[in-house]
């Protein structure tokens, strides 16, 4: 229930920010660590400190797929419609995330 309420609050904040002169701040809001806080609390309470630290380090590396999503979207917007650009960017994120998880598992197994 809490996660759903937080998600809804983020959507409302994004919609409100997109209508202001500081519309670009809408790009920062999704990066607020709402779900990271929940995940770190759950891992921190249920697992060891080393496991929590590993989760944090993996989270640092997870910035790479997000960057690839943003870079792909930026480039595709000049070439495709918005919806198609978003779809291509999501596919790029999925590929980058898959590579990240695969490498992480191989290096930490």
Image: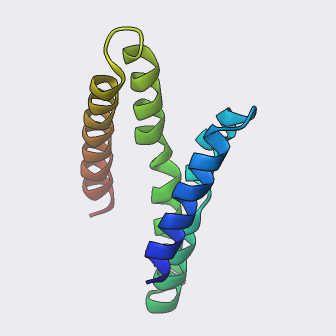
> Could one spot residue 67 in this view of the protein?
yes
Quadrant of the rendering where the C terminus is positioned: bottom left
Q: In this view, does 87 lie above or below 38?
A: above
On the picture, is 34 further left or further right than 79? right
Rendering coords of residue 47 (x, y %): 44, 87
Q: Which residue lies furthest to the bottom in this view?
A: 46
At 52% across and 76% down in the image, what residue appears? 38
Q: In which quarter of the image is residue 20?
A: top right
Residue positioned 41% across, 9% down in the render: 78
Place of residue 102 in the rendered image (x, y in percent of width and height, measured from the top left): 24, 50
Residue 35 appears in the rendering: no
Q: In this view, does 33 lie to the left or right of 76?
A: right
Question: For residue 28, what is the image quadrant?
Answer: top right
- In the displayed structure, 99 sits above or below 49; it is above
Residue displayed at 57% across by 72% down: 37
The residue positioned farthest toward the right in the image shown: 21
Q: Residue at x 40, y 40 (%)?
A: 65
Q: Residue furthest top?
A: 79
Q: Is residue 98 above or below residue 13?
A: above
Q: Nearer the viewer, residue 57 or 90?
A: 90
Q: Does residue 14 appear left or right of residue 65 in this picture?
A: right
Residue 49, percent across and down? 54, 82
């Amino acid at each position: 229930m809490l996660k759903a309420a937080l998600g809804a609050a983020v959507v409302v904040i994004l919609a409100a920010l997109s209508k202001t002169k500081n519309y670009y701040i809408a790009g920062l809001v999704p990066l607020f660590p709402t779900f990271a806080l929940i995940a770190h609390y759950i891992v921190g309470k249920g697992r060891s400190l080393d496991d929590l630290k590993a989760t944090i380090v993996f989270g640092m590396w997870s910035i790479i797929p997000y960057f690839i999503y943003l870079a792909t979207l930026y480039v595709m917007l000049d070439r495709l419609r918005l919806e198609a650009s978003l779809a291509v960017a999501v596919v790029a994120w999925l590929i980058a995330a898959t590579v990240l998880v695969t490498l992480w598992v191989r290096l930490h197994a």
